[in-house]
Amino acid sequence: MFTGIVEEIGTVSRVTVDGDTAVLRIEAPLVVSDAVHGASIAVDGVCLTVVEHDAAGFTADVMGETLDRSTLGSRDPGSAVNLERAMPAGGRLAGHIVQGHVDAVGTLISRTEHEKWDVLRFAVPSSLAPYIVEKGSVTLSGVSLTVSGVSAPGAEQTWLEVSLIPTTLELTTLGRLAVQDRVNIEVDVLAKYVERALAGLRHPSSTEQSGREQ
């Protein structure tokens, strides 16, 4: 599990593609300072497993499912990525519960700059709309953020807005985004569980229904 608090901006130094899988080499001295084989590191919000590591960085395998569902499939040598080590048991939950399982990819459609903060609006798949609420949590490329605005129900385009403070702009890759750049989106897992539970109440299984009829 992660918290969405980025520890380091790493650099992709090598991408080796083998059919529908890839191996990434990422230069990141901080997050490998205590790494072991099999450790989990979130790369732009995607939970990857450390295969090899040294004092300068690590390599990780990326399967086809991940390449299809995230932006990692378009990462080239020189790309900057947000990195976070898995939270240890008893660690501080500074952001929110982040699994490292990307739901979809969003696209930056506008950026409004203020004196010390920016508002970024992202187009998101309409299927994610039920899980995104104003003042709720969302993870964008591994960064835990508060949703500051959402599109109206039934809007032609589904979008969300986040407001970024100077620290986030400086210490994550979100500060470097330009319009049409893409980000990985992970919605709040608690919202998924709530929807699932409510769906069960609205549409009980055939077994439950049969039991009630008896």
Image (tube, helix red, strand yellow):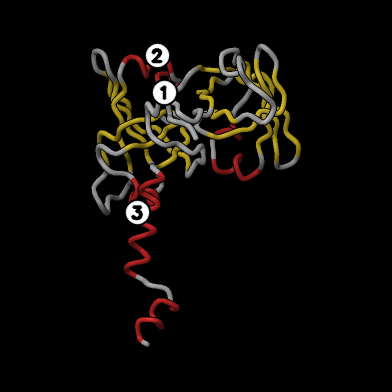
Residue 180 at x, y percent in the picture: 43, 31
* Figure disc tally: 3
State how far apart marks 3 and 1 are (Cα). 29 Å
Residue shown at 39% from the left, 30% from the top: 144
Rendering coords of residue 159 (x, y %)? 33, 41
Q: Which label belongs to residue 174?
A: 1
Viewed as shown, does residue 24 lie left or right of 195?
Answer: right
Q: Secondary structure at mark 3?
A: helix
Decide which of tag 3 and tag 2 comes sooner along the chain.
2
Q: Tell me the amino acid under the disc marked 1.
A: Leu
Discs 3, 1 touching: Cβ within 8 Å: no
Residue 119 vertical placement versus 133 (above, below): above
Q: CA distance from mark 2 to mark 1?
A: 8 Å
Closer to us: 6 or 69: 6
Residue at 33% across / 61% down in the picture? 198
Quadrant housing the C terminus? bottom left
Real-space CA distance between mark 3 and mark 2, rounded to the nearest whole angstrom = 34 Å
Q: Mark 1 Cα within 10 Å, few/some/many (few <14, many 20+)?
A: many
Crowding around mark 3 (Cα neighbors within 10 Å: few <14, some 14 to 19, many 20+) is: few
**Residue 170 circle label:** 2
**Whether residue 138 is situated above or below residue 172 in the rendered picture:** below
Query: Given contact means CB atoms under 8 Å apart, are the residues at marks 3 and 2 in contact?
Result: no
Residue 18: image location, x then y, percent: 76, 36
What residue appears at the point 38 percent right and 79 percent down from the top-left corner? 209
> Where does label 3 land, which residue?
194
The residue under the point 35% across, 48% down is: 191
Of 178 and 126, nearer the camera is 126
